[in-house]
Image (tube, rainbow, N blue to C red):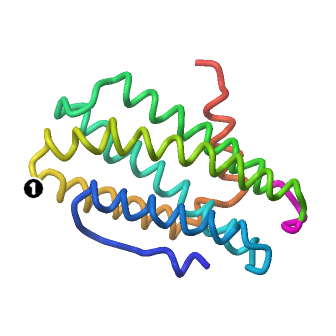
């Protein structure tokens, strides 16, 4: 299923991120359908969610901060929401029976966390990126983000052990 994840190599970072948001919605919708291969969909969601979020944190948020498009509080808030999403994802990945109510509850929890984050990110991060960052810079950020995202996908970043590591990283005292 991960071969169905688009692999852009360039483009406006805002549009690339929005494209992934639509893929998240499609994957979640498909996971709600019990006739689908829910395990394959869950694995695809895990791969894309981690690659997308980690690439945003390493290649986009800091650059938007340096361009004064977003402030440090927005960077921290978005990162915290990624961590909350990873935690919900880990719970979903640990469910053994994809036909169970527990799986449905896990899909619901991931959906809630992800929908909330996408809404805020689209309003509070992507809108300022559209208005405060040049087309050329958004294209440069898009290429950088896509390269990192694709590298993470190639590294199988949605493995349960990696998601567990991300959750542990977020919960470690500083």
Q: Which residue is disc 1 drawn over?
A: 136
Q: What stretch is highlighted in magenta?
A: 94-99
Looking at the image, residue 127 lies above or below residue 74: below
Q: Which residue: 70% across, 75% down? A: 40
Residue 169 placement (x, y as % from top left): 62, 34
The image quarter in which residue 123 lies: top left
Q: Which residue: 72% across, 66% down? A: 32
The image quarter in which residue 12 lies: bottom left
- Seen from the viewer's position, the closer of residues 15 and 57 is 15
Looking at the image, residue 68 lies above or below residue 52: above
Element type at marker 1?
helix
Screen quadrant of the C terminus: top right
Residue 22 placement (x, y as % from top left): 45, 64
Residue 71 placement (x, y as % from top left): 29, 25
Residue 164 placement (x, y as % from top left): 71, 46
Q: Which residue: 69% across, 50% down? A: 89
Screen quadrant of the N terminus: bottom right
Secondary structure predominantly adopted by residues drawn in magenta: loop
How many tags in the picture?
Answer: 1
Query: Quick check: 173 left or right of 52?
Result: right
Give yes or no for residue 96 being in the magenta stretch: yes
Looking at the image, residue 133 lies above or below residue 42: above
Q: Which residue: 88% across, 57% down? A: 101
- Seen from the viewer's position, the closer of residues 142 and 117 is 117
- Seen from the viewer's position, the closer of residues 102 and 4 is 102
10 Å crowding of disc 1: few (<14), some (14-19), many (20+): few
């Amino acid at each position: 299923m991960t071969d169905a994840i688009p692999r852009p190599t360039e483009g406006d970072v805002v549009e690339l991120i929005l494209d992934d948001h639509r893929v998240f919605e499609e994957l979640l919708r498909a996971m709600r359908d019990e006739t689908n291969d829910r395990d394959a969909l869950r694995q695809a969601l895990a791969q894309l969610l981690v690659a997308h979020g980690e690439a945003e944190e390493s290649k986009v948020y800091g650059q938007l901060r340096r361009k004064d498009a977003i402030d440090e509080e927005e960077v921290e808030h978005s990162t915290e929401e990624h961590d909350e999403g990873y935690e919900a994802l880990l719970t979903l990945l640990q469910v053994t029976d994809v036909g169970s109510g527990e799986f449905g509850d896990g899909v619901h929890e991931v959906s809630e966390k992800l929908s909330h984050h996408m809404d805020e990110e689209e309003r509070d991060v992507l809108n300022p990126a559209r208005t405060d960052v040049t087309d050329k810079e958004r294209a440069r950020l898009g290429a950088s983000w896509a390269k990192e995202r694709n590298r993470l996908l190639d590294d199988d970043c949605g493995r349960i052990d990696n998601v567990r590591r991300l959750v542990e990283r977020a919960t470690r005292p500083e």
